[in-house]
Amino acid sequence: MRRLFVAIRPPSAIRALLLAAMGGVSGARWQSDEQLHLTLRFIGEVDRHLAGDIAAVLVAVRQAPFEIALNGLGWFEAREKPDALWAALSPQEPLKALHSRIDRTLGRVGIAQDARAYVPHITLARLKRSAGPIGGLLECSGGLTSPPFTVDEFGLYESDLTPDGSVYSLVERYLIG
């Protein structure tokens, strides 16, 4: 079985900004440079035959290249406590459109559409239940903004879960234009 997802890898300058913003929250498991990505569609575990079909069908995804920028920080909650910190992006519309195109394309090989609302973000840290307050990070980040960067490709990635965190490997790269 292969655990797959579709994502955008931010350019090195954007990843450097994200790495520089990390810190100041006890109990946070910060992402490494190699882990920074913007998920377009989590697929999950599939057998190798379906993985091949997925890699082949994603070639059909087309959209005009677009620009996005970092635009603030946010968090997801579990049981009314933050469990993941992330960087927001704007504008969200082209990312949501690309997500929808990928979702529809994956339907051609039997992958059910994503039932959850798509929230474009780049995960910065996973938080333990005992994590310290995140307010200091939010204040120190200064809003975490960046110059715009162009999105003209995405990738199909495989995720291997290890005791030290996930290890991501690029399976295939796709130009969108």
Image (cartoon, rainbow, N blue to C red):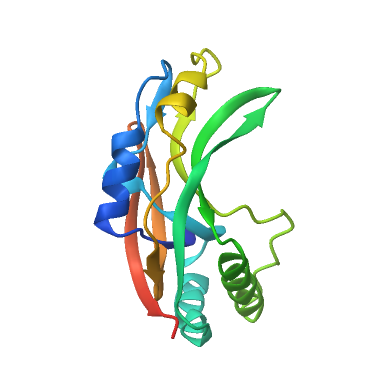
Residue at left 47%, top 38%?
143
Residue at left 30%, top 60%?
11
- Residue 168 placed where, x, y %? 34, 52
- Residue 65 placed where, x, y %? 45, 79
Please count the marks in the image: 0
Nearest to the observer: residue 97 or residue 71: 71
Residue at left 72%, top 53%?
116
The answer to whether residue 39 is above or below residue 75 is below
Residue at left 49%, top 48%?
71
Res 118 quadrant in image: bottom right
Regarding residue 3, the answer to whether it shows in the image is no
- Residue 119 placed where, x, y %? 62, 52
Image quadrant where one finds the C terminus: bottom left
Res 111 quadrant in image: bottom right
- Image check: 40 left or right of 117? left
The answer to whether residue 116 is above or below residue 106 is above
The answer to whether residue 134 is above or below residue 108 is above
Nearest to the observer: residue 25 or residue 174: 25
The answer to whether residue 59 is above or below residue 71 is below
Nearest to the observer: residue 34 or residue 48: 34
